[in-house]
Amino acid sequence: MRPPVDARKVYIITGISGAGKSQALKCFEDFGFFCIDNLPIALMDHFADLLARSGDLRRVALGVDIREGRFLAGLPAILKKLKTRGVAHRLIFLDASDAVVIQRFSETRHRHPLGKKVDQAIREERRRLVPIKAVADKVIDTSSMTLGELKERLSETLELTRAREMALSIVSFGYKFGLPMDADLVLDMRFLPNPYYVPGLRRLTGLDARVQKYILGQPVARKFLDALVPLLSGLLPHYIREGKSYLTIAVGCTGGHHRSVFVARHLAQKLRSTGYSIQEFHRDIHH
């Protein structure tokens, strides 16, 4: 018997053209899913075999739409067949009002897949999709949604934790070598006393316990760190809610050896303890 695939990890995205299917698939990619857009329905049976045999394809999202033509009518039957074969799934149907869809096609100047005037094509498409919408596990109306709001709704549907929704990087750097080009937030640590001028600490880095002890021994440093961690912890969920998939926090000091390295390490440890997955880099530590 084929092993079942986790029902929360195999999603089929469909709906009205212009309702946001392509954007939804991009969101799924950001969530770490393997995505295929417009997989022919006739091949789903074969894809089910691949899912059953592969231990790697455990997070899959498939995009299906009106471009399937007459084969689209067979989707409900195919889904029932997949379920009997142990491939559990959820069908998400994206919808939007006619006025919004017409406006989106007008703004993008894309041609409707049915090749008719947009208002006529929408009516025809809705008629064809009635049986599919009827079996959907989740219907999402995107008429008034931003991309960030759509991502938030999909996140709720997938029951993802927010900590897994955004790739968060913390990088230390030296101002004398220039700002990191991919920095979203920049924190300047040059207001802290510089261990470079303390005998015995110059050749060490912010990863050394003696440097860390020296910086933490400064009241201004403790006060700053006590305020910084709660501030960032409160901001990150809002970046996620607005659809931010990647965020880089750059922490700088003069040379990128002491203060910035210590604060970047401290910040990474604190945010990891609250559930975020952090990548930590020290760009200029060996300059």
Image (spheres, rainbow, N blue to C red):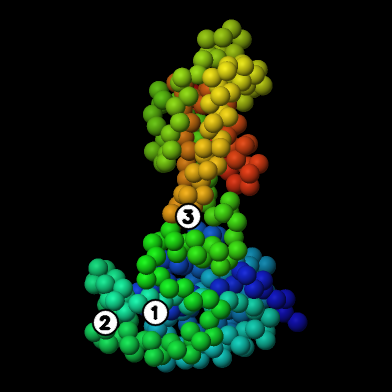
Q: Give me the disc on residue 241.
A: 3
Give neighbour class at mark 2: few <14, some 14-19, many 20+ (Cα, 10 Å): many
Left or right of residue 225: residue 113: left
Q: CA distance from mark 1 to mark 2?
A: 12 Å
Left or right of residue 5: residue 20: left
Tell me the kind of residue under disc 1: Ile
Mark nearer the N terminus (3 vs 1): 1
* In front: label 3 or label 1: 3
> In the rendering, at what x and y percent does residue 139 appear?
49, 76
Q: Give me the disc on residue 16.
A: 1
Q: What residue appears at the point 61 percent right and 69 percent down from the top-left corner?
A: 9
Query: Element under label 3?
Result: helix
Q: What residue appears at the point 58 percent right and 85 percent down from the top-left corner?
A: 79
State the quadrant of the N terminus: bottom right
| Res. 52 in view | yes
> In the rendering, at what x and y percent does residue 96 appear?
38, 75
In the depicted structure, whether residue 223 falls above or below residue 142? above
Residue to which mark 2 is pinned: 118
In the depicted structure, whether residue 104 falls above or below residue 174? below
Give neighbour class at mark 1: few <14, some 14-19, many 20+ (Cα, 10 Å): many
Mark nearer the N terminus (1 vs 2): 1
Q: What residue appears at the point 49 percent right and 44 percent down from the top-left corner?
A: 235
> In the rendering, at what x and y percent does residue 32 appear?
55, 60
Mark nearer the N terminus (2 vs 3): 2
Tell me the kind of residue under disc 2: Val
> In the rendering, at what x and y percent does residue 99 appear?
29, 76
